Structure formats: C-alpha cells, structure tokens
Amino acid sequence: MMLKLEKFLTLFIGIGAVGGAVMMWIDPTGVAWGGEPLLELLRAKMPWPDIFFRNFIPSGFVLLALNGLPQIAAAILLFKKLPLAHWTVLACGIILMLWIVLEWWVWGFNAISNLYFVLGLVEAVAALISLRRK
C-alpha cells in the first residue's frame, strides 16, 4: 500500500513540476496563466529581483531542479526497487514542504500551496513507514 502511494505521489508531483516549469518557460511573463501578480510578489520579497525575477524562466529551472527531476528520479528508483528509493522519496517530501513554506512566506496561505504541503507531508510519512518496515 505504501509503495503504491509513494509511486503515485512521486509521479504526480514530478510530472506536475515539469509541467509547471514548462508553463513558466512558454509564458515567462505569467500573463497567460495568471502568474503576473505572483511575479510582482517575488520581486518584492526575494533577493536580487532584477537578476532572478524579471520573468519566470529562472523559477522554472529551480522548480524543475528541486521538485520535478528529483521526484521523477525517486519514482524510477521505486519502480526499480532500488535500496535508496525510500530515502529519496523522504528527501523529496521534505524538499517539497520547504518549497511550500517559501511560497507561504512570499504569497501567503492558499489552497494549492496548502494541498502540496500536505502531499509532501504524506510523501515523507509514507517513506518513513516504508523505511521502518525494512
């Protein structure tokens, strides 16, 4: 049961993060997908806004690097039943929760961020349960 949950979560979060990164690269202004106000908040709260937050291109790379690729790598490790799989899932869950804490600091609480925090928490707990069983 936990293994199926971990596989689902890593794929769901990883594919979503890849999709989000691609969306940021296709429309780096955020206008088409409603992200323009979010970009203004990033510019107001994050360091070096003129370097990293002129558009969403750098944010897309960070999203891909921190949440997209690691989650997909964790899914691959799970499907191949490799020893580090559950540790990787645990790390992914923690990274996702930290990412959401940063989002809360920038944008405040919102339904999507809250949901993804819970998904990261469930992912981390499922990994811990799987590790405990081994």
Image (tube, rainbow, N blue to C red):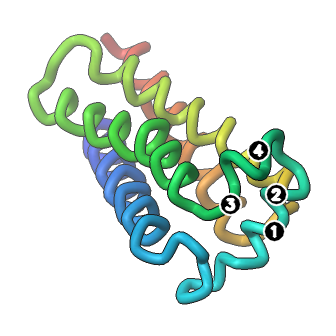
Between marks 3 and 2 in the image, the one whose residue lies nearer the viewer: 3
Q: Judge left or right: residue 123 versus residue 118.
A: left
Tag shown at residue 121: none
Residue 7 at x, y = what percent? 27, 44
* Residue type, numbered disc 4: Leu
- Give the secondary structure at mark 2: helix
Between marks 4 and 3 in the image, the one whose residue lies nearer the viewer: 3
Q: Sequence order check: which comes first, mark 1 or mark 3? A: 1
Tag shown at residue 102: 4
Residue at label 1? 40
Marks 4/3 in contact by CB < 8 Å: the verdict is no
Q: Is residue 40 above or below residue 129?
A: below
Marks 4/1 in contact by CB < 8 Å: the verdict is no
- Give the secondary structure at mark 4: helix
- What residue do we see at 28% from left, 42% from top? 72
Q: Sequence order check: which comes first, mark 2 or mark 4? A: 2
Residue 51 at x, y = what percent? 69, 46
- What residue do we see at 32% from left, 58% from top? 15
Between the residue at mark 4 and the residue at mark 1, the CA separation in whole angstroms equals 15 Å
Q: Judge left or right: residue 125 versus residue 129.
A: right
Marks 2/1 in contact by CB < 8 Å: the verdict is yes
* Residue type, numbered disc 2: Arg
Between the residue at mark 4 and the residue at mark 3, the CA separation in whole angstroms equals 19 Å
Marks 1/3 in contact by CB < 8 Å: the verdict is no
Between marks 2 and 4 in the image, the one whose residue lies nearer the viewer: 2
Between the residue at mark 3 and the residue at mark 2, the CA separation in whole angstroms equals 8 Å
- What residue do we see at 82% from left, 57% from top? 43
* Residue type, numbered disc 1: Glu
- Give the secondary structure at mark 3: loop
Residue at label 2? 43
Residue at label 3? 54
